[in-house]
Amino acid sequence: MLYRKKGYQVLKERNHLKDIKKGEKIIGVFSTGALPYSIDRTSLPDFKNTPTLAEMAKTAIDQMKDHPGGFVLQVEGGKVDWSAHANDVAALIHDQLAFDEAVKTVMDFAEKDGNTLVIITTDHGNANPGTIYGADATKKFNSISDYKYTNEYILNQIHKDFSVKGIKDWIYEGNQLALNDDEAKHLLSFYNGLEKEEGLYNYKKLPFKLYSDIQKNRNSVGWISMDHSGDYVEVAAYGPGSQLLKPFIKNTDLHDLMLKASPL
């Protein structure tokens, strides 16, 4: 209500993107908290009316592209980070693909416009997922395509009253993984209060690490941690000013690069 009084058009559903009034201030509030992971948005009916990152990026560009002073737009695929903290490979892959779609949307505009600088990067590495060598590594990795939900959604549906069989049936439904009794009992122990798992964005203390270790034996993906890593990360630039990008830079130097590239 406050934003409407300030003259904003408030968008709450994916369908609202079609009804935007050109030139008006807009704000999108598509969730009471973080937006859903891409794989859950695709699989769960409750999230069907949440826009994709690419759709939101296109809406923002269309709203600002004719401004005489130009515009600055930041598009963040933040759930890639969250999924790495949870060691959730399916969530990570789907949200990385969603980010790639957003990059295409931005690049389609920039190539046509000819006067837009695009910078693509990340603020840090995270958890260092990697495939593990083995005769069946490719087959195991390909099994990730059978996953229907994020680990967060799957683990949130389990509670202490679940039986061992109930956990095994639910995990098979969500990820097509056949757990043995010991694995199911270990998962259940977290919900009986015997164990708790800390971690960034894990306020419910869900057993992300244990579950990713169970998955690792089936999908051949391992993780070094659940935390940010100190890797060098990729940065790429396109358009006017991109020639200012050096092969190796400090992350704080991007600020100066954007100021130098700006005609203002």
Image (spheres, helix red, strand yellow):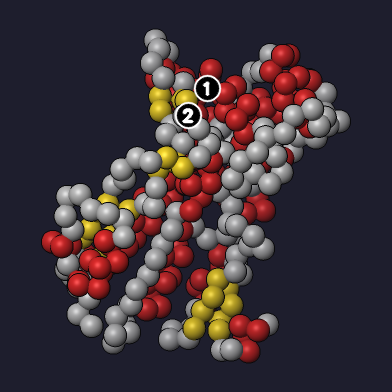
The local crowd at label 2, few if under 14, some if 14 to 19, many if 20 or more residues have their Cα within 10 Å, is many
Do the numbered discs 1 and 2 sit on residues whose CB atoms are within 8 Å?
yes
Determine whether the residue tagged by mark 2 lies in a helix, strand or loop.
Answer: loop
* Amino acid carrying mark 1 in the image: Lys
The numbered disc on residue 31 is none
Q: Quadrant of residue 190?
A: top right
For the C terminus, the quadrant is: bottom left
Q: Residue furthest left?
A: 243
The local crowd at label 1, few if under 14, some if 14 to 19, many if 20 or more residues have their Cα within 10 Å, is some
The numbered disc on residue 216 is 1
Q: Quadrant of residue 108?
A: bottom left
Where residue 38 sits in the image (x, y, percent)? 52, 48
- Residue 80, compared with residue 254, is above or below; it is above
* Amino acid carrying mark 2 in the image: Trp
Where residue 171 sits in the image (x, y, percent)? 67, 27
At x 79% / y 27%, what residue is drawn? 194
Where residue 155 sits in the image (x, y, percent)? 69, 36
Q: Nearer the viewer, residue 221 or 21?
A: 221
Determine whether the residue tagged by mark 1 lies in a helix, strand or loop.
Answer: helix
At x 46% / y 21%, what residue is drawn? 220
**Mark nearer the N terminus (1 vs 2):** 1
The residue labelled by disc 2 is: 223
At x 55% / y 71%, what residue is drawn? 28
